[in-house]
Amino acid sequence: MAGPVVDQFAADSRGRVRVGKMNIETSPVVASRYNVFGVPYLLIFDNGQYKDGLPGAVPKHEIMTRMAHYL
């Protein structure tokens, strides 16, 4: 459900942000490091530093609102 929203955000923000997807079942160390216990969960980094997390399926406008500070 969140996949298409994230894909659209990535397309709309191309050249301004990097968007990646991770499978927490194959990357449990990374998931544990950022306390990700459920999916979907969006992690926001700025210059390599963790800044924020958005748990659950989030509408695109909310992603854009949260990301506005970093764009």
Image: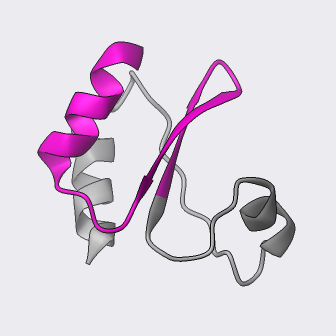
Left or right for 5, reference 35: left
Q: Quadrant of residue 14?
A: top left
- Let me know if residue 39 appears in the view: yes
Question: In the orientation shown, which residue stands out farthest toward the bottom?
Answer: 25
Left or right for 16, reference 32: left
With respect to residue 16, does 55 lie above or below? below
With respect to residue 10, does 4 lie above or below? below
Q: Is-magenta flag for residue 65?
A: yes
- Quick one: 53 or 7, which is closer to the camera? 53
Residue at x-position 44% and y-position 70%:
40
- Quick one: 9 or 69, which is closer to the camera? 69
- Let me know if residue 13 appears in the view: no
Left or right for 19, reference 65: right
Residue at x-position 26% and y-position 45%:
9
Tell me the magenta residue range: 42-71
Question: In the orientation shown, which residue stands out farthest toward the right?
Answer: 29
Tell me where residue 18 appears, x and y as whole percent.
Answer: 50, 36
Q: Is-magenta flag for residue 27?
A: no
Colour scheme of this structure image?
one colour
Residue at x-position 53% and y-position 77%:
38
With respect to residue 38, does 41 lie above or below? above
With respect to residue 1, does 50 lie above or below? above
Q: Quadrant of the C terminus?
A: top left
Tell me where residue 39 appears, x and y as whole percent.
Answer: 48, 75
Q: Quadrant of the N terminus?
A: bottom left
Tell me where residue 35 appears, x and y as whole percent.
Answer: 69, 61
Residue at x-position 65% and y-position 18%:
47
Tally the marks.
0
